[in-house]
Amino acid sequence: MAALTSSTASAQGDVLAQEPESKWSVNGDFRFRLEFNDNSGSVDRHRQRMRFRVGGTYQFSDRVTLGVRAITGNADDPNNPHVDLGGVFDSFEVSLDRLYFEYRPTEVKGLTVIGGKFNNPITRNPVYGELVWDADIQPEGLALVYGCQEGCGILDGMRVYGAQFAVLEQGGGEEAWASLIGFDLKKKTGDDSRIDFGASYTFFGDLTPDGSAGAITGDLNGNAMTGTELTSDFGILDAVAAFNINNFVVSAEMINNVRAAGGVGDTGMAIGAAVKTEMGKFYYNYATVEQDAVLSAFAQDDMLLTTNFDSHMLGWKLPLTENSGLHVWVMASEPNDAAVSTAANDTVYRFRIDWNLNF
């Protein structure tokens, strides 16, 4: 019996050893946030917040992948996956913010076709990268991404991308849509230094097709309006440059809405720096964004002002364990042009302490 048991166990071990690895890859994160808002001219707001995201990919083959992600937060507010504590003990809402496929044709090495609801491929500033597109927003449509990390000629990395986003579909009217094109490049300048550069252009079609405001209702925060219509059209150029040396990076960003209406502010810029030390990562970013330089419905919501602002952001990211850490950050913002501001013209502050856990 002992010999039979040993033989059976050995056979099972051989079978298990030959089984392929799981085609599923799962990851996620949890955040607990303390947030303190100093609102000039209105009541200050302090709250506790949470975010949970879990997603995964299924590898059908070397060429085809399916991806999905579930998140907390209001499904009607794509900028905000957080839930506020204090909802009279109501349950948290959970929805899908990603559901997509990736196809990598063997005929064109480095090309990926993406369709569905997916992460925005836009080039981002490495210090703070959400001035034009909030990172929480997962657009819907089709995208092509071509990149290489070796064999790129004189470059050490390169990526080119294009996408067509469906913003608003209507059964009885025209649709609202957006197009994105861009590229980013990497070039080593030494053993421990590198220059990164990237640029993108986002073209928004008619955001109120046939009079429907469904694409912008409830999400605009500071753009110029003429009645119920946006005063400007939006075609946003965004260029980012960064210089990396050892554990230090300095970045610069330029923004221009080339389709803004005459007489409305249409530019923005940011400069920032970050350094990694034994005590964690420290960073600082200064940004100035005029009223119609960005489309506020889809831009960042970390600062209390979404557009028409001058802001300072200072932060510290401290690793606690292999998979968790603290993020302490403070933001100060004031209107860039007081004459067109819908908020009080004093400086407003936001202070956050995040505990993040990744798996």
Image (cartoon, grey):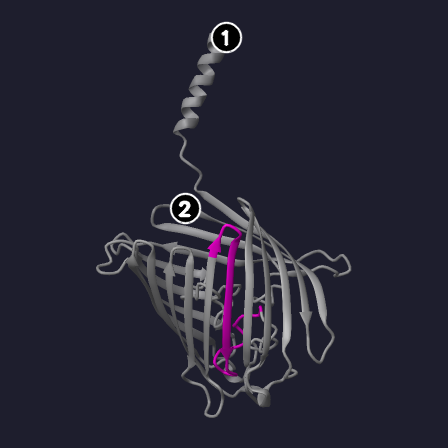
Q: Looking at the picture, does residue 234 appear above or below residue 279?
A: below
Are the two marked residues, 1 and 2, in contact with CB atoms closer than 8 angstroms?
no
The structure residue drawn at horizontal position 47% and vertical position 72%, both measured from the top left corner, is 132
Using the numbered discs, state the Cα–Cα distance from disc 1 to disc 2 in whole angstroms. 41 Å
Residue 298 on the magenta span: yes
Image coordinates for residue 194, horizontal then vertical, percent: 33, 60
The structure residue drawn at horizontal position 38% and vertical position 55%, both measured from the top left corner, is 246
Answer left or right for 49 relative to 176: right
Q: Is residue 266 visible?
A: yes
Report the span colored magenta: 276-302
Can you tell which mark lies on residue 216? none
The kind of residue on which mark 1 rests is Ala
The structure residue drawn at horizontal position 29% and vertical position 58%, both measured from the top left corner, is 188
For disc 2, the marked residue is 59
Disc tally is 2
Under tag 1, what secondary structure? Answer: helix
Image coordinates for residue 57, horizontal then vertical, percent: 46, 49
Q: Residues within 10 Å of mark 1 (few under 14, many from 20)?
A: few
Q: Please name whichever residue, 263 or 275, is drawn nearer the observer in this view of the structure.
A: 275
The first of marks 1 and 2 along the sequence is 1
The structure residue drawn at horizontal position 71% and vertical position 63%, both measured from the top left corner, is 47
Q: Residue furthest bottom?
A: 263
Q: Please name whichever residue, 86 or 242, is drawn nearer the observer in this view of the structure.
A: 242
Image coordinates for residue 323, horizontal then vertical, percent: 54, 46
Image coordinates for residue 77, horizontal then vertical, percent: 60, 67
Under tag 2, what secondary structure? Answer: strand
Can you tell which mark lies on residue 2? 1
The kind of residue on which mark 2 rests is Gln
Q: Residues within 10 Å of mark 2 (few under 14, many from 20)?
A: some
